[in-house]
Image: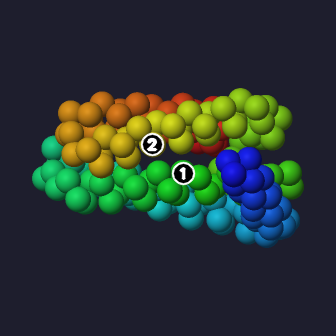
Amino acid sequence: MKLRNIVFSTAALLAISSTAFAQFQNAEKAVDYRKSVFTVMGTHFARIGAVVKGEASYNKEDVAKNAAIVTMMSTLPWQAFGPGTEGGHAKSEIWSDNAKFKSAAEKMQLAVADLNKAAQSGDLDAIKKTFGAAGQACKSCHDDFKKK
């Protein structure tokens, strides 16, 4: 039963991935898509940051919702970095050192997943700690792969 679920899940993921890649044969659309995704992520991440910095009051439900959005959005932009989608603020190293780029993306996704877990628990100290780690993962990727 588990093998069957894995096979069906893999087939569905491949179908979605190939469809998503086909959407981005036009580099301009890929750039617009990933900019939009990162803008939404940044907006919700900043809302958590305001709480972490003491600029906004802590509301467990709001932080949890924002962290869930960041986590979900963190899975989306990578399909818009395929071959032929160069442009925007993306450095050429994304395509020339794609393994390093994918590793950085995975680290960021794990860091925001940890932030989401902390936010869902409501532990403000854990939120602060994981927010810092997530922010560092984002910054590291920006430093290596985003044009200034």
Considering every residue shown, the one lying at the far left of the view is 57
Image marks 2 and 1: residues in contact by CB distance under 8 Å: yes
Circle 2 Cα neighbour tier, 10 Å, few/some/many (<14 / 14–19 / ≥20): many
Q: Locate residue 23 relative to residue 56 in the image: left or right.
A: right
Circle 1 Cα neighbour tier, 10 Å, few/some/many (<14 / 14–19 / ≥20): many
- Looking at the picture, which amino acid does disc 2 mark? Val
Tell me what residue is drawn at x 23 percent, y 59 percent.
Answer: 61
Near-viewer residue (67 or 85): 67
Q: Locate residue 16 relative to residue 147 in the image: left or right.
A: right
Q: How many marks?
A: 2
**Residue 35 location, x and y as percent?**
59, 60
Q: Whole-Å distance between the Cαs marked 2 and 1?
A: 8 Å
Tell me the SS state at disc 1: loop
Q: Which residue is mark 1?
A: 74
Tell me what residue is drawn at x 79 percent, y 58 percent.
Answer: 11
Q: Which residue is mark 2?
A: 112
Please determine whether, in this image, residue 37 is positioned above or below residue 71. below
Tell me the SS state at disc 2: helix
Please determine whether, in this image, residue 29 is positioned above or below residue 113. below
Q: Earlier in the sequence, mark 2 or mark 1?
A: 1
